[in-house]
Amino acid sequence: MEARIREIVDGMTIEQKVGQMTQADIRKITPEEVRRFYIGSVLNGGNTQPGDAPGASFAQWRAATRAYHDAALATDMAVKIPLIWGTDAVHGHGIVAGATVFPHNMGLGATHDAELVREIGAATAKQVRATGIDWVFAPTLAVVQNTRWGRSYESFSSDPAVVRELGAAYVEGLQGTLGSDTSAVATAKHFIGDGGTDRGLDRGVNASSTVDLIAIHAQGYVGALDAGAQTVMASYSSTRDYGKMHGAGTLLTDVLKKRMGFDGFIVSDWNGIAEVPGCERDHCAAAINAGIDMVMVPEKWEKFIKKTARAVRMGDIPMARIDDAVTRILRVKMRAGLFERDPDAVVGDAQDLLARDLARRAVRESLVLLKNNGAVLPLRRDARILVVGKSANSLRNQSGGWTLNWQGMKNHNADFLTGDTLLAGIREVAGAANVVFDKTAAKANVASFDAVIAVVGELPYAEMKGDILFPAPLSESRLYPEDLQVLRKVAGHGKPVITVLVSGRPLYVNDLMNLSDAFVAAWLPGTEGKGVADVLFRDAHGAIAHDFHGRLGFAWPNTPCQASFAKAGDTPLFALGYGLKYTNPKQLGPLATPAAPPVCTQ
Ligand code: GLC
């Protein structure tokens, strides 16, 4: 294979080599331009769908990927090089309407179930391959140390050992047998230290010592590379000693490629090269010289090719570096079987977008029981239930970011061609006649019910839009006052209140918890909301249907400013690994709720 690659590279012009290193967004490049400029890769960014409109059909995805693949094989090159298309299927193929969406990584981390995560990786590969896509920008291997970060939910855990184990499992599932019809290329991202920036600032500075970079932030890569991950995405963030990761040759080349022996390719993040001092969106010799092999230059790809080719001719970028980058890209494409693949061969079908039972099982296993006073849970199926809260009937809120679009905010239940809300699950097990939904608890007479289920939490966000910027407190009731209002209405009527928090991270909830008899962390469960009712209710015979399985992958704050537990002395409300079961209940007394609105110092 290496000899074959060398022969191909030796026969390529500079423009063809640089074109091969270029990844453009399909909104900004046509198949004809892919052919004409010898483009090696395209992506659909979080807001990009075929036809440049939301809700592209399965058939439209299939047609678009086919058109781009055919174009890449129609160049005038002696040896045609197949295209590789990347997508952010970070919790299933979430951008495709009709695809099952799994819990985000924070929920999967709470399952501590590597076999489940492996199966989810495999199911995700089938979903993307059915749409003609070969490469997934996942798993995120951030070991998040500060939950102010808007990408905390993309992290399995603050515990590096959990990230290492689950990251490896996800890569094994996703890639399976490279080159097979059910394999997709994985991306270990974002190298290195994205989850350890000061105060969790997105794209900020990770001031860790080298020891901590290795012991905490590198562990996911040890697992993922051992599992054979073929690509790595560079992080927007910086490290204390090496600056912006996109220009950090010591880490990208000396550490990752040489000492860790990574022989796949490194892809930059979306316009990530522009963040390297002295660089632009369409040109950065420093990033390529540092070890970036494929450049995600979504819009300005034509200028990028011209400027980079000139830089090669001027000697600013050694030809050997270009040849190494192209060699790595061809190596991954050959390992992925792209050279052998018949583009007319159809892999999978729309059915492969669905994995509802697997996702529902993941939801069940991800739930963490934090409080269950008086053993009010599990509920009997014949109980009369009042359901309240803004996230009980919202596929948007339960799926979070990276769903149908980048932020996940503009979604309505009707946009999801598949999926069940938590309310749908409650109605199914308790019987619709026994269930009343009153989102704001405006009208309902609580006393006439046996129990109240309040589903509250965060609205969707992605990346920097989800940052809780210092010094704002991470207090749920300050961020979302409507949730405390609802609980104040339904508590104190002598009926048990079960609160389900749908959020992308732990938050300070002592005030909400004091108004709840039971409290469940549900994270961002995705489309299969019925998994929640599976656990909250007994089975038809009155026995426990599914006990809680989840355990915290992140410590839970006891004060409104506890975003990080890296320093000793920060005592959490619940420690890493905490989780009650029906078989081992524990009473929780009233919690302290500081009166004055805090000004955080961390
Ligand atoms: C985003 C994210 C990265 C994603 C890429 C393509 O900005 O940082 O995780 O894979 O762009 O959407």
Image (cartoon, rainbow, N blue to C red):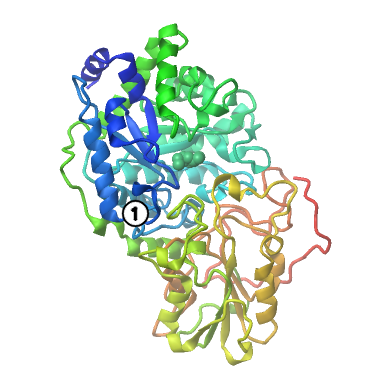
The quadrant the N terminus occupies is: top left
**Residue type for callout 1:** Ala
Work out whether residue 581 can be spotted: yes
Which residue appears at 40% of the width and 80% of the height? 428
Answer with left or right where residue 474 lies relative to residue 597.
left
Eyeballing the image, is 586 above or below 268?
Answer: below
Please tell me which residue lies in front, 221 or 320.
320
Give the total number of marks visible in the rendering. 1
- Residue 391: percent from the left, percent from the top? 54, 68
Say which element carries label 1. Answer: loop
Q: Name the residue under label 1.
A: 56
- Residue 599: percent from the left, percent from the top? 80, 52
Eyeballing the image, is 496 above or below 351?
Answer: below
Answer with left or right where residue 2 lies relative to residue 454.
left
Which residue appears at 58% of the width and 59% of the height? 578
- Residue 311: percent from the left, percent from the top? 45, 12
Quadrant in the picture for residue 222: top left
- Residue 105: percent from the left, percent from the top? 48, 51
Label 1 crowd (10 A; few <14 / some 14-19 / many >=20): some
